[in-house]
Image: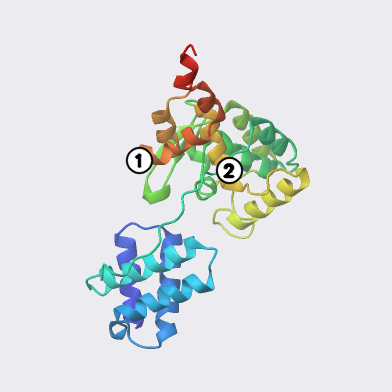
Amino acid sequence: MRNLFVKMQKDIELRGLSSSTKKVYLREVIKFINYYKKHPEEINTQQIKDYLYYIKQKYPKSTSTLVQVYSAIKFFYIMTLGKQWDQSIKCYKRKKKFPSVMSIDEIKLFLNSTPNIKYKAIFSLIYSSGLRISEAVKIKIKDINSKDMRIFIRDGKGGKDRYTILSKTTLKILKEYWKVYRPTEWLFPNRYSRKPMNRRSINRVFIQIKNNIRINNAVTVHTLRHSFATHLLEGGVDIRKIQVLLGHSSIRSTLIYLHISKREMQKVVSPLDRMNL
């Protein structure tokens, strides 16, 4: 079995999947095999279905968990074992929900309520440049181009590199941060190692501040990225430019912000209002 897991790791890396995806896939496949305590080639189609049903019952409110387990097992059988995937083994698609967005006033309140200059720099950067938290922690000093006012994002989602904008306000905050912490390689280094900062601490501080100012409980650090895109759209920025800044492969991922922009919705005039009734 060990050889199979080593092969699966290689298969995941060859496909260019992220380290977090690799971790999830390996974990879920190990759980699946341990559940039946037999070689995976001895597990039949009905048993795979039964296991997915077991996961659905165990986590009834988490569609994402079921999708992760399904994707991991399917990848393992197709890519690692080289088996045909029985098309009768299906999984519910995730329900698409509109992302939460903070208003401009809420963003301003949130940043002004962040006393620590390091976290203020992190949250300002994520919001003003539309970053994922995983991208923010991997930024190096050399990636900040203050001359051209842009930031190089290395190894984003799907292993893609891109550039995004650098805010003048954020640059001022980053300079204040640098004077205090003096980072040398990573912009936000880990205090105890030479690695980037841990994402968990960023999430923890975000929740603390959010609770202190009592804003919408549904918001997360990722909401800052959603807010960036929505506020750009409401400011008149072309949707395709927003797509490039966010690093979306498909415009369909970016079009979601048309649905959640109040200002864009208010621009639309009903055909009934054009009639003289």
Tell me the residue at 40%/39% (across/down). Answer: 162
For disc 2, the neighbor class at 10 Å (few under 14, some 14 to 19, many from 20) is some
- Between residue 188 and residue 163, name the one nearer to us: 163
- Is 95 drawn above or below residue 44 in the view shown? above
Q: Which mark is residue 100?
A: 2
> Would residue 198 be visible to someone looking at this image?
no
- Between residue 97 and residue 228, name the one nearer to us: 97
Judged from this view, the residue extending furthest toward the right is 212
Q: Amino acid at mark 2?
A: Ser
Helix, strand or loop at mark 2: loop
> Would residue 55 be visible to someone looking at this image?
yes
Q: Nearer the viewer, mark 1 or mark 2?
A: 2
Give whichever of discs 1 and 2 has the lower sequence position. Answer: 2
For disc 1, the neighbor class at 10 Å (few under 14, some 14 to 19, many from 20) is few
Judged from this view, the residue extending furthest toward the top is 276
The residue wearing badge 1 is 250
Indicate the quadrant where residue 101 lies: top right
Tell me the residue at 37%/37% (across/down). Answer: 251
- Is 229 drawn above or below residue 197 in the view shown? above
Real-space CA distance between mark 1 and mark 2, rounded to the nearest whole angstrom: 21 Å
Q: Position of residue 262 (x, y in %)?
A: 56, 30
- Between residue 267 and residue 154, name the one nearer to us: 267
Q: Position of residue 77 (x, y in %)?
A: 29, 73
Indicate the quadrant where residue 271 lies: top left
Q: Amino acid at mark 1?
A: Ser
- Is 4 drawn above or below residue 257 in the view shown? below
- The answer to whether 35 appears left or right of 44 in the picture is right
